[in-house]
Amino acid sequence: MRTMEDPITVEAGEAISLEDLVEGWDGEATVVRRARAVEGVIVVAVHSTLLGPSAGGCRMRTYGSTAEAVHDAHRLSSAMTQKFAACGLPFGGGKSVISVASIPTDDDRRALFHEVGELVESLGGVYIVAPDMNTSDVDMDVVGERTRHVFCRTESAGGCGSPAPATADGVHAGMRAAMGHVFGTDDPKGRVVLVQGVGAVGERLARHLAADGAEVVVCDLDRARAVALADEIGARVVPTDAWIGEPCDVFAPCAAGGVLEPSTIASLRCRLVAGAANNQLRSPDDAVLLAARDITWVPDYVLNAGGVLKGAGLELLGWSPDQVEARVAGIGTIVASLLERADRTGRTTLQVAEDVVAERLADAAAARARHT
Ligand code: NAI
């Protein structure tokens, strides 16, 4: 099952070998293990440990082949390196995927996550696992019965609970900073903000913006959800196929990825795009198209780091809730500095985010070289 959010460039049936994938990747390690509890395969990809142990979610889904699963783990793990480096956390990029014929339940699911825990434990802390698509904080509690190298468990098990509220708070802080850059004031009062997708993150973001006095417009595939929220916070609802032409100051994609591509970019009627959805650009060239239309785009992996700051901060770094809150609010400072550098250098916001990541990794590599 593929989604727009999750493009896999290795097409089903395409002859790409595991050998090519492993040799052609710039990451550090790929571990593939048969999942004995179900008919499946567990893959752990460690992209980088330059900034610290690798960390990232465990995604479970159906893949066409083990090569596709490995390719996805590689891609997602590289993205985690960027995310941690961009928000200044001392972790490297890692990811795991479980390739299954169907999503397991009950005893099979427990046995599967025990296997995941055993595999993670066998890696001795090089990779720290968390939930992702089709896996949950409850699954991480089960993983935690076999390894310490896990985060984002349930609150009752000592974990941080849902990362979504912190993600929404970080998007809100970053969006306000971006408004300050684009409109000369970070006050959302009177600004029209279109929130696409009012799930766990989008709903809280819309509530924050309504409380700020913004004119909030929402859309969601689940129209009843959008209408209920709109009634409560005084927002307006637009159909999901009408968001592109909707005039607004800010567009906040908080649903699926891949929403920014040449045809949608050409039709956008906003000055700023700032939302939580992962992988908003279909291709890096889309950042150039946005800049050419004088639309400021805040890179998703910078803006949506609040959840990871909370999970890693509370569970792995021993931060207090106040420290987490301050770091999540600090996404505003990171965004302001990124947008200022893009203006000063004439580079796109995507290029600047990549520059910052490359600089942090180069510094860490130089420091490591000095100590060896
Ligand atoms: P969610 O699943 O709770 O909510 C997504 C909402 O978007 C749902 O209400 C769904 O009906 C709606 N939706 C899906 N496709 C749509 C479309 N084409 N048009 C309009 N509405 C659509 O997901 P959540 O947790 O709120 O995450 C939202 C986005 O933020 C996702 O892309 C996710 O990957 C990303 N993200 C979430 C984080 C978190 O902490 N939850 C962390 C970082 C990124």
Image: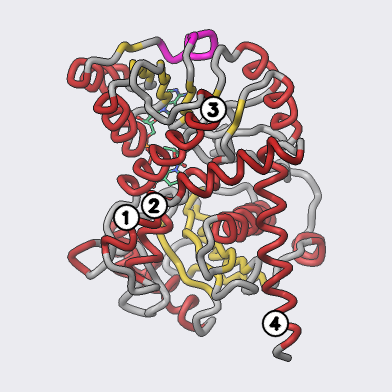
Whether residue 319 appears in this view of the structure is: yes
- Where residue 100 sits: x, y (%)? 50, 54
Would residue 136 appear left or right of 269 to someone viewing this image?
Answer: left
Q: Are marks 3 and 1 in contact (CB under 8 Å)?
A: no
Choose the circle earlier in sequence order: 4 or 3.
Answer: 3
Mark 4 to mark 1 CA distance (whole Å): 31 Å
Q: Is residue 216 magenta?
A: no
Choose the circle earlier in sequence order: 2 or 4.
Answer: 2
Q: Are marks 4 and 3 in contact (CB under 8 Å)?
A: no
Which amino acid does the dot numbered 1 rest on? Glu
Mark 1, Cα crowd under 10 Å, few <14 / some 14-19 / many 20+, is some
Mark 3 to mark 1 CA distance (whole Å): 24 Å
The one nearer the camera, 300 or 366, is: 366
Q: Which residues are magenta?
A: 239-247
Q: Which mark is residue 328?
A: 2
Give the labeled residue for mark 1: 325
Task: Indicate the secondary structure of the residue bearing disc 2.
Answer: helix
Mark 4 to mark 3 CA distance (whole Å): 37 Å
Would residue 59 appear left or right of 311 to someone viewing this image?
Answer: right
